[in-house]
Amino acid sequence: MIRTLALCFCAIATPFGVAAHQLVVFASVDCKAVTVEAKFSNGRVTQKGDVRVLDGANNLLTTLQLQSDGTATVPLDSVDHSAGLLIEVDTGSHDSYWIVTPEDIARKCGS
């Protein structure tokens, strides 16, 4: 009986433990660059990871490394952002993404 209860508890608790480590990605635009931030849902900063920047047609434009503070900067003059950007962050065990639309960029650039 105790083993059955312990097994049931583990089966119920496991999904919550996995969800607690979800990767959260956010990207903001300031007209000169896109600043990417990555952290886990528990608030812990992601210190290592690859940041892939893709255009609106899913073509890889560049790959960057996250800094120790969980950020990366993509200069807008270094990538074709006319169709928007897809920012993917991969830590090796977790991944997530953020979409920057052409409207996001235009709004920040006063266009």
Image (cartoon, rainbow, N blue to C red):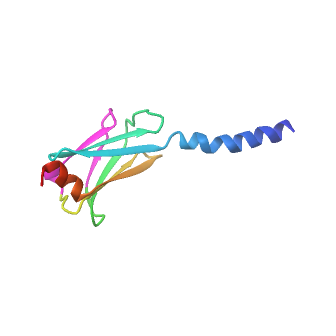
Point out the image quarter for the C terminus.
Answer: bottom left
Look at the image and say whether residue 69 sits in the magenta stretch.
yes
Give the farthest residue toward the bottom. Answer: 57
Give the farthest residue toward the right. Answer: 1
38 lies above or below 85: above
Q: What stretch of residues is rendered in magenta?
A: 62-79
Q: Position of residue 79 (x, y in %)?
A: 18, 55
In front of the other: 43 or 71: 43
Residue at the (39%, 34%) spot, across then down: 45
Q: Position of residue 40 (x, y in %)?
A: 44, 38
Q: Position of residue 93 (x, y in %)?
A: 48, 46
In front of the other: 65 or 89: 89
Query: As drawn, is 85 to the left or to the right of 92?
Result: left
Look at the image and say whether residue 55 sits in the magenta stretch.
no
Point out the image quarter for the N terminus.
Answer: top right
Residue at the (73%, 39%) spot, across then down: 9
Query: As drawn, is 102 to the left or to the right of 45?
Result: left
Q: Which image quadrant for residue 48?
A: top left
Q: Position of residue 28 (x, y in %)?
A: 26, 45
Residue at the (41%, 50%) spot, across then down: 96
In front of the other: 107 or 67: 107
